[in-house]
Image: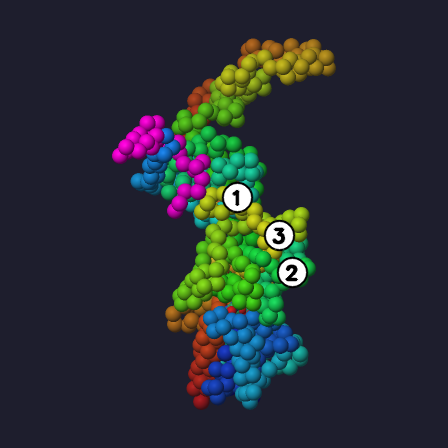
Amino acid sequence: MAIHEKTLIDPDRILQHDHLVVDGVDVSGSWNTMISPRTLVDYEPDFEKIIQSYGGGENVHRCWQCGSCTNSCTMYAQNVDFNPRYWIYLIRLGLKAELMKDKDIIWQCVSCNKCTNICPKDVRPEGVMKATAHWLEENGYTPKTLSTHFDEEFTHQCLEFGRIEDTEVMMGFFKRSGQPLVQTWIINFGKNLSKHMPLGQLAKMGLNVVFRPKTKSWGRTGEVLAEYVKTQKEAAHHG
Amino acid sequence: MSAQDTVLVVGAGPAGLSAAATVAAMGKKAVIVEKEDVLGGAPIISGYAKLVPSGEWAKDAIGRMVSRVEGDGNVSIHKSTKVSQLDGEAGNFTATLSNGSKVEAGSIVLATGFTHFDSINKPEWGFGTYEDVLTTSQMEQMVATGKIQCPSDGRVPERVAILLCVGSRDRQIGREWCSKICCTVSANLAMEIKEISPSTDVFIYYMDIRTFGLYEDKFYWKSQEEFKTKFVKARIAEVTKSPDGRLLVKGEDTLVKRPIVIPMDIVVHAIGMDPNALNPEIAKTFGIGLEKHGFIDKAEQYTNSQGTTRKGIYTCGASTGPEDIDTSIAQGQSAGSRAVADLFSAQKVAV
Ligand SMILES: Cc1cc2nc3c(=O)[nH]c(=O)nc-3n(C[C@H](O)[C@H](O)[C@H](O)COP(=O)(O)OP(=O)(O)OC[C@H]3O[C@@H](n4cnc5c(N)ncnc54)[C@H](O)[C@@H]3O)c2cc1C
Ligand code: SF4
Ligand code: SF4
Ligand code: SF4
């Protein structure tokens, strides 16, 4: 099939010599442009299963490529490269290298679920986007998202102390995601708090931050839990 | 008339008409019970145009089937009537009809057909909102008038879009079946439109084209090659209206990988075949089972092809799932003769 748009051609497949003379004719620059063929040489049949092992990806095998998801998609309306239908196709055949070309926009899904509501095969494309973004993140292909940083800090504190301390979670989250620890909104929040809260309560909150109370007799529970979470994750992704 | 020489046929579409004619031809009595006041089933009630694959007008083709039973001394007909109660068992049924009369029958053929999908259930495709959005049966009625024009203002459409699989193959609305005939009917409709209105271009939006068996070249290829029907691989997401009054079909052209917003003058829904809306009631009255989609369930496939889950009751045509007319007629003959065979074996036992 003919290629319709130059934007569909990967830049590294455009071959061009700045100076070229063939049989005495100067064909320098765009006169000698060649495009190397984009031949797909194999499938990775297990890739679909991997995506299915992430929450939300379970139904990806049901897709029949009708395009309803893409068409209804909020992000597609902003950027036609955001194409869930196409990515699902790549996932199903295991065309990982092709998928990777879009790795920096897949996470942009806003979870509006329009796709899920229209999909005639109940693929739940929104879930597939989530699963794919997680896979990309876990394998280090994309930087961790803010929500992942938050989840990690939250889980870390649960496992460590058997409870969470709001301020600690926020601080840890800012640290993990490389955000400044002192944010303007926190300063304002603190100012308002001191205006309206009794002094004793404030002092108690402050002490909690410093002394980090643990749930009583938490002991080895956290370690056991952490181990359990780890094996469950491994089982899901490699089973 | 005794139970031993009578078959009760419920429904007078192509399948029921064929079953009744078969019973009569074998020298037995057929009693037809039809809920509408006309015979002929969907092709007559909904006013189909030229039929697939014969190319004959529905009113002529099915009309012949109707007059065949109307003129037969072995067939009696109750119109605008339903069976309200069934007593007895195989070999000796007694049916009480809604008009008060009773019918004794040795066996029964249920030819109660299907219900057209109601496009209102897919509001995003504009039916009921825009006058120029029609169903295939409405478009067939327009073809039958011999004039192609937009219902809104009577102009000749430059473009007609036919959307396939409306009300079929869609988990969102619990319809997990292919309606089998709508691809072929749509390819045929596109040719009929072009024939009447050569300046009109027809676009068919598809996910798959299922013009099975010999319908491939006769309808799909012919429509594409000779009648210039454009086939576009896209499932339309939405039909809206542009300020100039034309319709806009929006979707993704999956081959080009680009969004489409294309102006159209008429949009046609290729509506699917639902289970007869009365099936729960029919199942209760006749004591038969329904399969998981809501169509009438069948007995063992290979040795009792037209059987229902109840002994002595047979079924045929679109009551058991989306079916075309030719197959419905063949099944009607099959069910009719199987029902007559029951009468003979009941007689043998009686002697
Ligand atoms: C838009 C469209 C176009 C089509 N065009 C074609 C075509 O060109 N060629 C083709 O081969 N097929 C076509 N079909 C399919 C065709 O309509 C069916 O194959 C055919 O009508 C099936 O016949 P039937 O007798 O089984 O059912 P039906 O035609 O549905 O007849 C059933 C009859 O039973 C009656 N009935 C229902 N319930 C009861 C009850 N409880 N008591 C008494 N009576 C009852 C109904 O009133 C009806 O008269 C088309 C379908 C659609 C939707
Ligand atoms: S949930 Fe994501 S993929 Fe689905 S329509 Fe919304 S933005 Fe698009
Ligand atoms: S709407 Fe569903 S079936 Fe259609 S392309 Fe999207 S995921 Fe696949
Ligand atoms: S016959 Fe064609 S239009 Fe009808 S449901 Fe099947 S695929 Fe869709």
**Distance between mark 1 and mark 2 Cα atoms:** 28 Å
The residue type indicated by label 2 comes to Arg
Task: Please provide percent x and percent y for residue B288.
Answer: 52, 68
Q: Chain of mark 3?
A: B
Q: Is residue B245 above or below residue A79?
A: below
Q: Classify mark 1: helix, strand or loop.
A: strand
Looking at this rendering, what residue extends furthest in the left direction?
A: A23
Please state the horizontal and vertical placement of residue A117, each as a whole percent of the image.
56, 45
Asked whether the viewer can see residue A135, the reply is no
| Residue that badge 3 annotates | B247
Magenta span: A1-28
Q: Could you tell which of marks 1 and 2 lies nearer the N-terminus? A: 2
Crowding around mark 2 (Cα neighbors within 10 Å: few <14, some 14 to 19, many 20+) is few
Q: Are marks 3 and 2 in contact (CB under 8 Å)?
A: no
How far apart are labels 3 and 2 at the CA level?
Answer: 13 Å
Q: Which residue is mark 2?
A: B155
Depth check: give the residue in front, B216 or A87.
Answer: B216
Q: Position of residue B336 (x, y in %)?
A: 48, 79
Please tell me which residue lies in front, B101 or A127: A127
Residues under numbered marks 1 and 2 in contact, where contact means CB atoms less than 8 Å apart: no
Residue at image coords 41%, 42%: A3
Name above or below for residue A207 compared with residue B151: above
In the picture, measured across the screen, residue A22 lies left or right of residue B321, that is left
Can residue B187 be spotted in the picture?
A: yes
Three-letter amino acid code at the position of disc 1: Pro
Q: Residues within 10 Å of mark 1 (few under 14, many from 20)?
A: some
Which numbered circle lies on residue B259? 1
Q: Position of residue B89 (x, y in %)?
A: 52, 77
Dividing the picture into quadrants, the one containing residue A163 is: top right
